[in-house]
Amino acid sequence: MIEVKNIQKKFAEKTIIQDVSAQFKTGQCNLIIGASGSGKTVLMKCIVGLFHPDSGEVLYDGADFTKMEHDEKTEIRKQIGMLFQGSALFDSLNVEQNIMFPLNMFTDWNLKKKIDRVNEVLARVNLTGVNRKFPAELSGGMKKRVALARAIVLNPKYLFCDEPNSGLDPQTSLVIDKLIKEITTEYNITTVINTHDMNSVMEIGNYILYMYQGVKEWEGSNKEIIFSKNKKLNDFIFASEFLQDAKDMRMLEQAGKISNVRNMDDLLSKENPHS
């Protein structure tokens, strides 16, 4: 689990993050959402150590990352996988070499063991046999899957995804979401995702942190978000008339299910008065 407590971050005199606390639990997809300039990217960078918060704590399984020595931080970073917004593949390296890059940096494995691991993670993201292809030969969705394979090649405890669906069509986005969700569950990873994609919010958002002008405006699950009364959140998530109608329909659907369950309970209690 990753926990942030009362994080604050300023640049010059401008406060970007103000007193934000949250828990990102293991084995679930934890989403940070918000409009551009809301502070979500700065918050993620504080969590991974690219920025040092002015105050507050960043706890990795109870250990405060902000107070660690350099060697201790390095050990935590070895347990972190990162999926970058633009995939960040090396154009001059083929797929196999790109995925092998973290293994070359952090392990002393022999070449066969490295290649076996590369093939294992490629199979996991459904890209068997593309080892010799270069990034320029891949579609946007394939690049994201290669980048995801590289992010998990060291079997990380923590996975960070920065706008994983950026630049992808809706169908490919769903494929990436499904992969991230499956990998998170299978490997019991603490996954933190920075996203604008509302499909991701509704499909895989086990926990959602909504940032507004540097503060935590709302938190909850993708099931709770439908019934939220928070106006800022609703204006952000359900901005269009179409999405507002979809929200209203889903609320009616859920209300109907609840009503049916209550009616069934009443019926059963009448049939079995002594149960």
Image: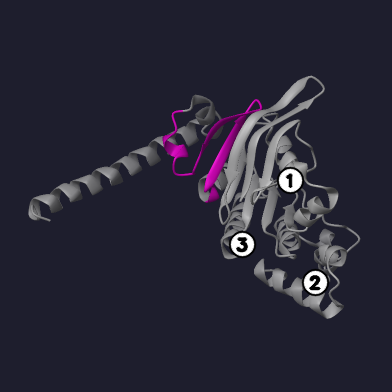
Q: Secondary structure at mark 2?
A: loop
Q: How many marks?
A: 3
Q: Check residue 214 for magenta coloring.
A: yes
What residue is shown at x 87% (from left), y 67% (from top)? 104
Give the crowd class for mark 1: few <14, some 14-19, many >=20 residues within 10 Å. Answer: many
Q: Position of residue 103 (x, y in %)?
A: 82, 67
Which picture quadrant has residue 54? top right
Query: Residue 11 placed where, x, y %?
Result: 80, 26
Return the residue at label 2.
131
What is the distance, in whole Å, between disc 1 and disc 2 at their CAs? 36 Å
87 left or right of 182 in image: right
**Magenta-tinted stretch:** 204-229
Q: Amino acid at mark 3?
A: Ile
Report the mark closest to the observer, 1 or 3: 1
Q: Which label's residue is closer to the chain start, 1 or 2? A: 1
Q: Which mark is residue 65?
A: 1
Disc 3: which residue: 183
Check contact, mark 1 vs mark 3: CB within 8 A: no
Q: Amino acid at mark 1?
A: Phe
Label 3 environment density (alpha carbons within 10 Å; few <14, some 14–19, many ≥20): many
The tag earlier along the polypeptide, 1 or 3, is: 1
User: Mark 1–mark 2 contact, CB under 8 Å?
Assistant: no
